[in-house]
Amino acid sequence: MSAEINLFSPIQLGAYTLPNRIVMAPLTRNRASDGNVPTELNAIYYAQRASAGLLISEATQVTPYGQGYPATPGIHSPEQVEGWKLVTEAVHTHGGRIFLQLWHVGRISHPSLQPDGVLPVAPSAIAPAEGEASTYEGPKPYVTPRALETDELPGIVEQYRQGAANALAAGFDGVEIHGANGYLLDQFLRDGTNKRTDAYGGSIENRSRLLLEVTAAVVSVWGADRVGVRLSPSGTFNSMSDSDPKATFGYAIEALNQFGLAYLHLLEPSEADERHGGMLIPTSYFRPLFKGVLMANWDYDRNKANTAIANGNADLVSFGQLFIANPDLPERFRVNASLNKPDPSTFYGGSEKGYIDYPALELQAS
């Protein structure tokens, strides 16, 4: 029976029945306007891709202190809420569903991006070992972040809760908590970046505390059936490491079961993770641990996605670069059509080019 399930099988995702299992992954495109406000251009981009079973927005900072890149949108000001309304209304007009991804980059920032030029915050005062910060003036060396005080952490949780409330006001259908890719929640979770000795450091239970507190706060706004969480157990991006990722993420994933979330979104290991010495743990390892809907991501194509769904290793698959270049990706998958090639030179920043000008498939009448 399971072999009959594929990308075009409907699925119940929390509060929603999705018409297909093809998800647009969160994709940073650096095209917000002044004040990190979404615009009509962003609305066109998302509406073009509304045939996905679910759209997940680009990562969106919940506080000005959570910004790590130029021209990334926020969800902490009234102007940003109004800008996002353009997006959600356009997606809904085209029959789609869209979740907002809630984000705080932690140490992956730079004083030039911070209000009043202060240091970025992190679980511990450890700078990323590789790479450079992205700023409006170009790449700059990472600085050593300031370790958050224990009494500041309820304020971080509140930033996520308020961001979730603002996303509700902006008309989204749900939210995804960004706990992956070496950003703040991931920094707390892994012992390579978390050297704390308080209730948020040391044991796996303590290092998972902030993720679980944020999840509880966001669920208090939305209800669990409209909330997802994204994790990257094998990820080495942004100089991330953990001494025992199977145990760390196994604990966190099982702990997330208590909420009854809409889904868990896991990144598969990548070639870059292998090059950087990460432990390569496939999503299938964690499949038995999570009791709800599991979404997989990273380097999937149509056939690999159908196989993962048919054998039960994933319930949905999210696609990144393929959706950048193919706004009508579900239709192209349906008829097994050729795909547009993405142009990496236009991924980050700019305007219409490489953003809303990829052609849709023109089916020829027989």
Image (spheres, rainbow, N blue to C red):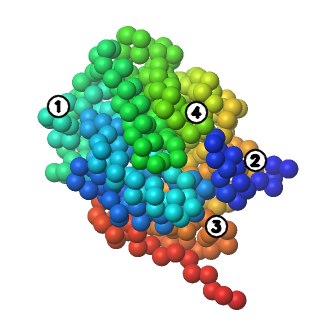
Given the image, on which type of amino acid does mark 2 rest? Answer: Asn
Kindly report the distance in space between the C-alpha atoms of the residues bearing marks 4 and 2. Answer: 27 Å
Q: Nearer the viewer, residue 245 or 68?
A: 68
Q: Which residue is mark 3?
A: 333
Lower position in the chain sequence, tag 1 or tag 2: 1
Given the image, on which type of amino acid does mark 1 rest? Answer: Val
Q: Indicate the position of residue 244 as horizontal and vertical percent values.
A: 53, 24
Lower position in the chain sequence, tag 3 or tag 2: 2
Tell me the tag on residue 72: none
In the picture, measured across the screen, residue 236 lies left or right of residue 365, that is left
Q: Which residue is mark 2?
A: 311
Q: Nearer the viewer, residue 229 or 251?
A: 229
Considering the numbered disc 4 on the image, is that residue within a helix, a strand or a loop? helix
Q: Which residue is mark 4?
A: 224
Which of the two marks, 1 or 2, is nearer to us in this view? 1
Given the image, on which type of amino acid does mark 3 rest? Answer: Phe
Q: Quadrant of residue 253?
A: top right
Residue at image coords 42%, 36%: 165
Residue at image coords 73%, 56%: 9
Residue 263 in the image: above or below residue 343: above
Considering the numbered disc 2 on the image, is that residue within a helix, a strand or a loop? loop
Q: Indicate the position of residue 324 as horizontal and vertical percent values.
A: 46, 63
Mark 1 and mark 3 in contact? Answer it, CB < 8 Å. Answer: no
Which of the two marks, 4 or 3, is nearer to us in this view? 4
Q: Indicate the position of residue 54 as horizontal and vertical percent values.
A: 57, 53
Lower position in the chain sequence, tag 4 or tag 2: 4
- One can see residue 139 in this view: no
Q: Which residue is mark 1?
A: 118
Residue at image coords 36%, 15%: 196
Which of the two marks, 4 or 2, is nearer to us in this view? 4
